[in-house]
Image (spheres, rainbow, N blue to C red):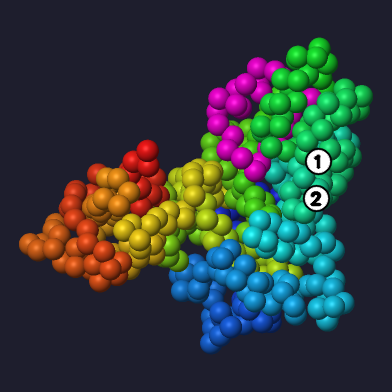
């Protein structure tokens, strides 16, 4: 009988899972404090005292820009910027990195030597992949970690992998025809290109029945397009820095969090957790001492879904990718970013959600901060306008609206100007 779950961790009581994750936090923090960059960021933190989400939320957020800045500053001595516990001889590292990758920036990410290092096997299993399958992997094997993330997960499941990489559509299509893979891993757009090319050239691909896609949005329209051609496509949410974060199941109701990550949803531009169900930025703490990123900001927006997955998996679900959290814009020659709006809100705790709308034409733009407040005191709008001026050095109108007026989409700054 085919098993329903990758392992017993997927069906744990939520309280047991949460207890295990929080119990693992101190060791992860000690690993972080053992690398130079994070030792500075976590100076004075008692790792043993951080055993709750409330305590975790008090720690600083690490952003991709922080890693890039540190790496650029140390190119001649430590190209990983002091964030990694693994490396190679020239770094005088006691523990070896198996590979090192380059993301745009360039930012360099290390990979250790553990089995299923990026935790992709669970996502592949949920997409229907099983031991003995042949996986056609069209993620890139060059520079970035994408191809290796899926390759290592497929190997851990006992699959055979064809490393197709990106491009060379005709050659990849020929390999699909000759080798008859059971499934595909790669971007959804390349799978569509391959299937369209197959139809155009009369190549039959009857063996291709399933796919795990990532790296791009996977709208229901494309999912249904694949289904009409006999391919059941599922999505995984992953990044080059931390690997797989969440994955889709046959229930098609959001993405289930991986068992090896601690995920927080915070107000964009801050490290402050938002209420369950509210859209915010995804922060990830991966229980990995090799590259011990703590509260790493992905820059992606999502929200927690209520309840558990109908498949029986009990971990928290998120809605999936809902856009980018970095909404920084320039107004009258000054940068305005979500963190500044968050600072304004801290000065006025009676306010709930807020959205800064920038309108007009370039060089003739205007700002209006819309704020939700259940019971606005006299003079609130004027006081908030003063705070905006203090924080951003720009003037803004303020409009007070009732709670629930603003869309729950994570958007803090809406640049509605005309650029024509």
Q: Is residue 289 above or below residue 409?
A: below
Q: Position of residue 229 (x, y in %)?
A: 70, 18
Mark 1, other Cα within 10 Å: few <14 / some 14–19 / many ≥20: some
Residue 73 among those drawn in magenta: no
Query: Residue at horizontal 33%, vertical 62%?
Result: 341
How many labels sit on residues?
2
Please identify the residue farthest to the top as the structure is shown: 202
Mark 2, other Cα within 10 Å: few <14 / some 14–19 / many ≥20: few
Please identify the residue farthest to the left as the structure is shown: 378
Dot 1: element: loop
Quarter of the image where one finds residue 243: bottom right
Q: Nearer the viewer, residue 337 or 119?
A: 337
The answer to whether residue 22 is visible is no
Q: Is residue 38 above or below residue 125?
A: below
User: Is mark 1 in CB contact (under 8 Å) with mark 2?
Assistant: yes
Residue range highlighted in magenta: 208-230
Separation of residues labelled 1 and 2 (CA atoms): 8 Å
Q: Position of residue 268 (x, y in %)?
A: 43, 58
Q: Is residue 395 above or below residue 60?
A: above
Residue identifier under label 1: 165
Q: Nearer the viewer, residue 236 or 261?
A: 236
């Amino acid at each position: 009988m085919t098993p329903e779950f990758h392992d017993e961790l997927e069906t744990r009581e939520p309280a047991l899972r949460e207890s295990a994750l929080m119990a693992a936090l101190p060791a992860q923090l000690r690993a972080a404090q053992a690398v130079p960059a994070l030792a500075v960021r976590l100076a004075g933190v008692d790792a043993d005292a951080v055993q709750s989400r409330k305590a975790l939320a008090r720690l600083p957020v690490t952003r991709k820009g922080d890693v890039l800045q540190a790496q650029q500053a140390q190119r001649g001595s430590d190209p990983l910027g002091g964030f990694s516990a693994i490396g190679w001889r020239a770094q005088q590292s006691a523990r070896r990195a198996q590979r090192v990758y380059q993301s745009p920036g360039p930012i360099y990410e290390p990979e250790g030597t553990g089995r299923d290092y990026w935790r992709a096997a669970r996502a592949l299993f949920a997409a229907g992949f099983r031991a003995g399958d042949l996986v056609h992997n069209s993620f890139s094997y060059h520079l970035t970690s994408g191809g290796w993330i899926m390759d290592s997960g497929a190997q851990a499941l006992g699959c055979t992998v064809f490393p197709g990489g990106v491009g060379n559509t005709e050659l990849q299509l020929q390999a699909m025809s000759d080798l008859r893979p059971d499934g595909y891993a790669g971007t959804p757009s390349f799978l569509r290109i391959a299937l369209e090319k197959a139809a155009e050239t009369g190549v039959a691909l009857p063996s291709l029945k399933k796919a795990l896609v990532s790296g791009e949005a996977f709208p229901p329209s494309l999912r249904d397009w694949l289904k009409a051609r006999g391919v059941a496509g599922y999505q995984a949410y992953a990044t080059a820095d931390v690997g797989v974060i969440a994955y889709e199941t046959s229930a098609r109701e959001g993405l289930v969090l991986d068992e090896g990550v601690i995920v927080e949803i915070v107000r964009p531009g801050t490290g402050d957790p938002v209420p369950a169900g509210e859209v915010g930025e995804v922060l990830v703490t991966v229980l990995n001492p090799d590259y011990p990123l703590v509260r790493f900001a992905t820059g992606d927006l999502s929200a927690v879904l209520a309840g558990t997955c109908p498949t029986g998996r009990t971990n928290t679900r998120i809605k999936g990718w809902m856009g980018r959290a970095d909404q920084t814009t320039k107004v009258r020659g000054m940068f305005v970013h979500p963190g500044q709006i968050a600072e304004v809100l801290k000065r006025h705790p009676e306010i709930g959600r807020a959205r800064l709308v920038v309108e007009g034409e370039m060089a003739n733009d205007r700002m209006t901060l819309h704020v939700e407040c259940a019971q606005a005191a006299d003079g609130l709008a004027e006081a908030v306008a003063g705070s905006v001026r203090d924080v951003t050095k720009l003037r803004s109108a303020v409009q007070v609206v009732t709670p629930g007026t603003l869309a729950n989409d994570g958007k803090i700054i809406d640049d509605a100007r005309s650029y024509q």
